[in-house]
Image (spheres, rainbow, N blue to C red):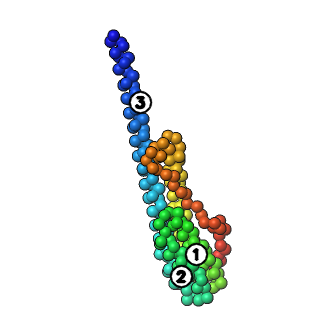
Amino acid sequence: MENSFKKWLTWPVIIIVVLALVLLYGLAKYNGLVKANIAVDQQWAQVESQYQRRFDLIPNLVNSVKGAMTQEQTVFNAIAEARTKYAGATTPEAQAQAAGQVEGSLARLLVVMENYPQLKSIDAVQGLMAELAGTENRVAVERMRYNDMVASYNIGVKTFPGSLIAGMFGFDARTLFEATEGSETPPTVNL
């Protein structure tokens, strides 16, 4: 009789232990998804920080070359419009699209600057161009890190059993940063 009681007691204990392990695994997976989601947001903030650095440099560059490039008002207007769109963007996708427009406008500015050889001798312009080039490199690095974070997060959200936890708690896949169309061909600049 005692053997029968032990067998009867063993199954509930095994079931409780298995359920506790499943619950602990689910909690760990949930916490991992929360941490990954926060890491993605934090990395996007780094991208935004570099965008802001770029936007802070642009007016200085534009003002430095504006006097010499009086005929090129459309380029300056395009840069101002793109910056305004970025400021009004509320999602990472919209911000990335607006940043792409800024990049296109800057590329046009650099190409137009080729027509003004006197700008090559202005130290302020050269310094700003070097700062802008450094900032563009920083933006590229932060975008790459953002995409790495998003890819890691998306793997956790889309693979089993993480997809079950993600579905229960509303974790959705995040969007990777993608370059704007036409950005694969860089402008030729000879300053």
| Quadrant where the N terminus is found in the figure | top left
The residue tagged 2 is 62
Q: Marks 1 and 3: in contact by CB < 8 Å? A: no
Of pointers 3 and 1, the one earlier in the residue sequence: 3
Q: Which residue is drawn at 44% across and 43% down?
A: 29
Q: Can residue 170 be seen in this view?
A: yes
The residue tagged 3 is 18
Of pointers 1 and 2, the one earlier in the residue sequence: 2
Numbered disc 2: secondary structure: helix
Q: Which of 10 and 65 is in front in this view?
A: 10
Q: Which residue is drawn at 41% across and 42% down?
A: 28
Q: Is 7 placed left or right of 43 in the picture?
A: left
For label 3, count other residues whose C-alpha is less than 10 Å away and answer few (under 14), some (14-19) or many (20+).
few
Q: Which of 1 and 39 is in front in this view?
A: 1
Q: What residue type is labelled 1?
A: Leu
Q: Residue furthest left?
A: 2
Measured as percent of width and height from the top left, residue 129 is found at: 55, 76
Measured as percent of width and height from the top left, residue 177 is found at: 55, 60
Q: Residue at x 50, y 44 (%)?
A: 163
Residue 106: give its label: 1
User: Is 103 situated above or below 40?
Assistant: below
